[in-house]
Image (spheres, rainbow, N blue to C red):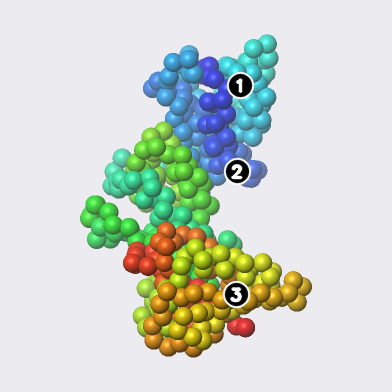
Amino acid sequence: MEFVIKRDLFIKAATGISGMTTKQTLSPVLSGMLLVVSSGNLTLVGSNSDIIMKQVIPLCSNDLLLIEEGSVLVPAKLFLDIIKKLPETINVKGLSHCQIGITSGEIKLRINGLNPDDYPELPKMEAAQAITLNKSEISALFKQTAFAAAKNGTKPVLCGINMSISEGKIRCAATNSHRLASKLLQIANQDIRCSIILPNKGINALIRILDHAESDISLFLTDNYMIFQMENITMYLRLVEGNYPDISMLIPKVHQTEISVSTKSFLEGIERASFVASNRNHTIQLIINSETELLLVSASAELGEISERQLMHSIKNELDLKITFDGVFMSEALKTIQTTETILRFGGTMRSILVTPSGDDSLLHLISPVRA
């Protein structure tokens, strides 16, 4: 195996792949980056077993020269650190089954690699049905929900994002038991039906890639993986085992109070109140005691207190309300709302707050109250 490539092109591809590899010594091959020259392409693969990323660099003039087909498995971090310190053009050559030669200008290196034959095969997706989505649609689907998943805990399913597909709709939902984010998207494909759990770390890595994607995204579902295929990048996310909570049972159907507020003004007020809120639970109190104004209050013994009046655009049903919630949860929910107005619905002092964009029921957030 041998190829010659421009340094900057190689670093860009290798950086993303290296980030997918693992440092665990129990699976040494997964600390490696697989380089394959075949079918007129250079392919890079990295994996930590739960996430696999494959990037194809197609043959293009002046940037890539393919000399000999074959494969090598290089130690990912060491290899990336080395090529970052080399001049513009890099020659990589397999010297033996487990040894790699690197040449750049007057610099010559020889590093020990791993056996590429030991690298796990990529999941097959020939028989899998595909859904094709616009990159902005799939990006919004995950950006508006993934942040609400649990970061760690005893319930692995809550550290993932539930994706359910049926009757031409995709719904993504994430919860950590104290808040919930749910987004619904209409799709053309009416045939696929499933309910799966995707790893949050994999979704966050996918979001970063989608920000730079230029083509539509194809989704393939296999027995163990959801596969996201873009123009030159493919990501394989291993499905999380377990049963996700039925979120339809969590969403309240009846509300005592409904208000509409300016999304921008309310978010800024929440962020100001968070400055002096307790660092442990970020508590903010919302008080409604008139038809036009609400009050945001927060305080901590260390920092002081703040009180701010906000104008409500409308209010329905009961007027008097006092409820305490986590300011970070509220601000993160508001940042996903694209409409100028936000609707907040309250079922009482100790019932969850339902937050939705005005005129858009496809996105909702549920935030549990905090005992004052």
Q: Are marks 2 and 1 in contact (CB under 8 Å)?
A: no
- When asked about the image quadrant of residue 75, the answer is top right
Residue 231, percent across and down? 38, 35
* For marks 2 and 1 on the same chain, the one whose residue lies earlier in the sequence: 2
* For marks 3 and 2 on the same chain, the one whose residue lies earlier in the sequence: 2
Q: Vertically, is 337 above or below 105?
A: below
Label 2 and label 1: CA atoms lie apart by 21 Å
Kindly identify the residue that appears in the image at 57 percent across and 29 percent down.
Answer: 11
Residue 249, percent across and down? 39, 76
Residue under label 2: 22
Residue at the far right: name it. Answer: 302
Label 3 and label 2: CA atoms lie apart by 48 Å
Asked if one can make out residue 68 in the rendered structure from this viewpoint, the answer is no
Residue 100 bears which disc, if any? 1
* For marks 1 and 3 on the same chain, the one whose residue lies earlier in the sequence: 1
Mark 1: give few (<14), some (14-19) or many (20+) Cα within 10 Å: many
Which amino acid does the dot numbered 3 rest on?
Glu
Kindly identify the residue that appears in the image at 48 percent across and 82 percent down.
Answer: 351
Q: Is residue 96 left or right of residue 126?
A: right
Q: SS of the residue at dot 3?
A: strand
Residue 188 bears which disc, if any? none
Kindly identify the residue that appears in the image at 53 percent across and 26 percent down.
Answer: 9
Q: Vertically, is 27 above or below 239?
A: above
Residue 198, percent across and down? 45, 55
Asked if one can make out residue 340 in the rendered structure from this viewpoint, the answer is yes
Q: SS of the residue at dot 1?
A: strand
Marks 3, 2: nearer the viewer: 3
Residue under label 3: 308
